[in-house]
Image (spheres, coloured by chain):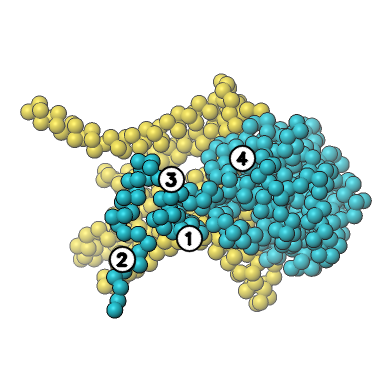
Chain colours: A cyan, B yellow
């Protein structure tokens, strides 16, 4: 004997209507309604299908979707998949090429980001402009300030309040394909010279004022963070001279380096480690004349639509056992001693990721003033438009 | 009588109202906002702060290269498009077997079903080191660079905008009265002189529509130069993105946008005038 399909249904239509009216009258709770009708379970299942229900679903307080703004090649995709599997929240990843771009989006409003990855020098400005919230550390049980290396993490605090917690630190150096370029490259001075000679048409600079202008300044013997008009003018002159020789102005340089379209690029630690891991001929060099040392943080925008999910993902990422996988995949050095202990020897002994203290000494942390200085912003825009 | 007039006016108003409201909210108001911004100043942290200054317009020459690139590459791209599109449209409308015509015409449109972004990305791989240059190196031609050159941008433009050029030309050729061609042949004209004396002039409205359409869209192009030009071949669209999304200089960005709109209007008027002159007294069905 076959059963009519409705006998298998969790609830009859009449009873569903009854329960709905009871819910509308307020005589039962939403929880009761979702439980007795089976809708809670149904939405919990459906919520795992990204794109099916983009609005915050009834069940669970985390919603079904969240969005993170970060950098290219900066996460292990498996991390987000595992988070989605654990919580039912799908993570949309947006990548950016510069902090200025992130700031511009947040200033314009309506980003929809629930979590983003700003660099150390921007945080005081975000706080000043009221674009990020002080973090509620009670929701971040996995974050432990006492295990963090304060040298890298102090800029997450403003006036004693924690606005951002560290993702990782890193450096901005030079990636050189040694099978293509024979000239020695060990400084930013070399970088710009080789860019106009042996690596003509094969060099990339970031689409990012801080590093592109900063490293040009360093190559001329000035501070990475200079905003002095005469020094900036010299840097502009150099950049305009180099521009016809460049392959591209783009912060997502891994594809071009891997395809050997580009032979040399300004490069962040994590990209340097990833490139070198897959193509040992690509070396990662720190400028002996200077350059940038940085820390990237996680922060939650004031305008976040789904803060609970933002906190949940952040807390997930702060757990050492999750962070360690991120660090192995991404290749950036950790600020957290708990993670450092879990990392395999081959990572911690990698000189690209954990360079000698001496090679870090000439490097400078980015300064807050460079983010908003109109001179640097306009110089970068002029350089690109030239 | 008056009642009927009023009724008709009401009907007209009802028909026009949605479009008018749409234009007012999404075109006129933003344009006014942009004009106001263009006379303002960049706030210390970026963005806009009220002021009344012509400084932004005085700064326009610093973007001369971007304007020049746009004003050269947009018409050049449109003309290249035309050179490729005309024979295609001619074949489709005149020569192709009518039985397959619909299939062939839909083949022109099919690429539109995939996002331009994805198709342009595909070109990045075709033109990059692992694509055509790799094949060329196999026959001994080494170190060819195609990607991130003005040529790659032009190629991307022709590829991306070709259907927009083919369609209006195809329509104007298809409407062509075949009896005129027979009459021309009867009067002793050779096929070549029939083409230049009859077919081409009669298809000019379609050509002008296509050229204007592609040129106008190209004046605001951003994506293709960004992806195939490596951020080095700079259009005004790219300069605008930079000013709003990187240097956060809204007033200067607005000034450039206003100037671009003015330039587009001038280009459009010139194009229309030329079109009318060439096509004689006939109306050119453009935008």
Q: Quadrant of residue B253?
A: top right
Q: CA distance from mark 4 to mark 2?
A: 47 Å
- How packed mark 2 is, by other alpha carbons closer than 10 Å (few <14, some 14-19, many 20 or more), is few
Mark drawn on residue A301: 4
Q: Position of residue A78 (x, y in %)?
A: 64, 63
From the viewer's side, name the closer residue of B27 and B260.
Answer: B27
Q: Is residue B77 visible?
A: yes
Residues flagged by tags 4 and 3 on a common chain: yes
Q: How many marks?
A: 4
SS assignment at label 2: helix
Say which of marks 4 and 1 sits in front.
Answer: 1
> Mark 4, mark 2: which one is toward the viewer?
2
Image quadrant where one finds the C terminus of chain A: top right
Q: Chain of mark 1?
A: A
The mark nearer the N terminus, 3 or 2, is 2
The spot of residue A265 in percent (x, y) is: 75, 56
Check chain identity for marks 4 and 2: say if they share one.
Answer: yes
Residue underneath mark 3: A29
Q: Quadrant of the N terminus of chain A?
A: bottom left
């Amino acid at each position: 004997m076959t059963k009519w399909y409705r006998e298998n249904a969790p609830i009859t239509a009449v009873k569903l209507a009854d329960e709905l009216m009871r819910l509308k009258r307020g005589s039962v709770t939403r929880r009761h309604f979702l439980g007795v009708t089976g809708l809670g379970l149904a939405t919990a299942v459906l919520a795992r299908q990204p794109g099916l229900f983009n609005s915050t679903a009834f069940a669970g307080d985390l919603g079904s979707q969240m969005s993170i703004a970060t950098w290219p090649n900066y996460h292990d995709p498996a991390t987000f998949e595992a988070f989605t599997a654990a919580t039912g929240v799908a993570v949309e990843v947006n990548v950016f090429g510069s902090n200025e771009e992130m700031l511009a989006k947040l200033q314009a409003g309506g980003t929809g980001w629930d979590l983003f990855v700003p660099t150390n020098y921007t945080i005081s400005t975000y706080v000043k402009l009221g674009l990020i919230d002080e973090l509620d550390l009670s929701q971040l049980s996995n974050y432990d300030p006492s295990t963090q290396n304060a040298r890298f993490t102090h800029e997450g605090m403003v006036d004693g309040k924690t606005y951002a917690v560290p993702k990782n630190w890193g450096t901005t150096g030079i990636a050189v394909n040694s099978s293509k370029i024979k000239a020695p490259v060990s400084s930013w001075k070399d970088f710009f010279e080789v860019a106009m000679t042996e690596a003509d048409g094969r060099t990339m600079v970031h689409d990012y004022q801080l590093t592109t202008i900063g490293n040009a300044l360093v190559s001329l013997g000035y501070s990475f963070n200079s905003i002095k008009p005469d020094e900036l003018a010299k840097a502009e002159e150099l950049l305009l001279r180099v521009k016809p020789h460049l392959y591209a102005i783009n912060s997502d340089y891994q594809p071009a380096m891997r395809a050997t379209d580009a032979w040399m690029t300004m490069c962040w630690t994590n990209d340097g480690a990833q490139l070198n891991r897959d193509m040992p001929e690509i070396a990662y060099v720190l400028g002996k004349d200077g350059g940038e040392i940085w820390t990237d943080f996680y922060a939650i925008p004031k305008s976040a639509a789904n803060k609970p999910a933002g906190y949940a993902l952040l807390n997930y990422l702060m757990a050492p056992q999750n962070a360690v996988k991120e660090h192995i995949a991404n290749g950036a050095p950790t600020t957290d001693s708990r993670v450092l202990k879990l990392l395999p020897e081959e990572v911690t002994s990698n000189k690209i990721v954990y360079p000698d203290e001496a090679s870090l000494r000439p490097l400078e942390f980015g300064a807050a003033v460079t983010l908003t200085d109109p001179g640097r912003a306009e110089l970068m825009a002029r350089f690109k438009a030239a | 009588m008056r009642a009927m007039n009023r009724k008709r006016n009401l009907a007209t108003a009802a028909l026009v109202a949605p479009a008018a409201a749409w234009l007012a909210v999404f075109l006129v108001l933003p344009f006014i906002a942009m004009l106001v911004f263009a006379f303002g100043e960049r706030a210390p942290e970026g963005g806009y702060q009220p002021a009344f200054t012509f400084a932004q317009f005085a700064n326009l020459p610093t973007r001369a290269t971007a304007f020049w690139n746009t004003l050269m590459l947009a018409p050049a791209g449109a003309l290249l498009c035309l050179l490729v599109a005309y024979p295609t449209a001619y074949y489709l409308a005149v020569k192709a077997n009518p039985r397959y015509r619909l299939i062939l015409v839909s083949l022109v449109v099919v690429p539109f079903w995939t996002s331009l972004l994805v198709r342009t990305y595909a070109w990045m791989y075709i033109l990059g080191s692992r694509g055509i240059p790799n094949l060329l190196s196999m026959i001994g031609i080494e170190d060819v660079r195609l990607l991130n050159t003005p040529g790659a941008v032009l190629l991307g433009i022709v590829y991306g905008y070709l259907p927009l050029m083919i369609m209006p030309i195809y329509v104007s050729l298809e409407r062509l009265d075949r009896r005129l061609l027979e009459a021309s042949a009867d009067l002793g004209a050779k096929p070549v002189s029939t083409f230049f004396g009859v077919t081409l002039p009669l298809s000019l409205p379609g050509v002008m529509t296509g050229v204007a359409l592609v040129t106008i869209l190209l004046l605001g192009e951003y994506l293709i130069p960004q992806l195939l030009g490596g951020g080095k071949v700079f259009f005004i669209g790219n300069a605008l993105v930079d000013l709003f999304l990187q240097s956060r200089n809204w007033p200067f960005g607005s000034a450039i946008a206003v100037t671009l709109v003015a330039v587009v209007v001038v280009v459009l008027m010139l194009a229309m005038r030329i079109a009318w002159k060439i096509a004689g007294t006939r109306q050119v069905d453009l935008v």
